[in-house]
Amino acid sequence: MTAVFSAAVLALSSAPPSRAETPWFQANVGNATQVLSVVSTGGATAKIDVWQRTAAGWQPVGTGIPAHVGASGMTPQSHDGEMKTPMGIFSLDFAFGTQPNPGGGLQYVQVTPDYWWDGDMKSPTYNTMQICKKADCPFNTNPSSGTENLYIPQYAHAIVMGVNKARVPGNGGAFFVHTTDGGPTAGCVSLDDDTLVKIIRWLQPGALIAVAK
């Protein structure tokens, strides 16, 4: 899978070196073998490097992929409404999108207009995906509550980042790697959809995302 991904993605970047490298996140990802590294390039922009651990060590299989992050940059601790992307090491739990499953190792959910990400801090299902008709949802669906309807162009394809998995009210939710609309995000990481699809096809359970300034 690495070779296939390399051929597809490295057209956007430089060829990988023949020897293993030591990525900045190495000491913090345990036994993970796939990592998306997101490093700020200033303001609301970043670069993504895609890493695979082999028997020989860590190898970049895609580098310098342009991305957008939160309109207000990055933060060590996320909070609702800050428009900042959380820094740290997070799981990549599952993928979803308005488009059909592109394949890959992660669970994929094709969403309809009845799919929501509950951002209502008073809701027992805060920071989880929910399915309901808008009029019947037991949580606040008003965008001002932080709830998002997932049937939008920016979610043609998306990967859920495991931020605030304890679902502490106010510590933020709905952090995804998703299709870019060409501008800053509300705290997610966004990139070109064609490249995102290649990444989704490459990912396997246990993959992580590492975010830093």
Image (cartoon, rainbow, N blue to C red):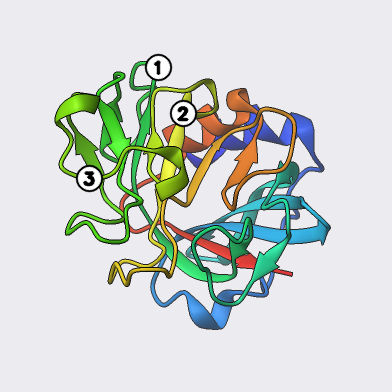
Q: Residue 157: which disc?
A: 2
Q: Nearer the viewer, mark 2 or mark 3?
A: 3
Badge 2, how many Cα within 10 Å: few under 14, some, many 20+? many
Provide the secondary structure element on which disc 2 rests: loop
Q: Position of residue 146 (x, y in %)?
A: 43, 48
Task: Point out the tag, 1 or 3, that comes first from the N-terminus.
Answer: 1
Read off the residue under disc 3. 139
Marks 2 and 3, how far apart in space? 25 Å
Residue plotted at (32% across, 53% down): 120
Q: Which residue is situated farthest in the bottom direction here?
A: 27
Task: Point out the tag, 1 or 2, that comes first from the N-terminus.
Answer: 1
Q: Position of residue 191 (x, y in %)?
A: 65, 36
Marks 1 and 2, how far apart in space? 7 Å
Q: Amino acid at mark 3?
A: Phe
Residue plotted at (25% across, 23% down): 114
Badge 1, how many Cα within 10 Å: few under 14, some, many 20+? some
Q: Position of residue 125 (x, y in %)?
A: 20, 54
Residue plotted at (30% across, 35% down): 116
Read off the residue under disc 1. 99
Q: Residue 195: which disc?
A: none
Marks 1 and 3, how far apart in space? 26 Å
Provide the secondary structure element on which disc 1 rests: loop
Task: Please identify the quadrant where the C terminus is shown.
Answer: bottom right
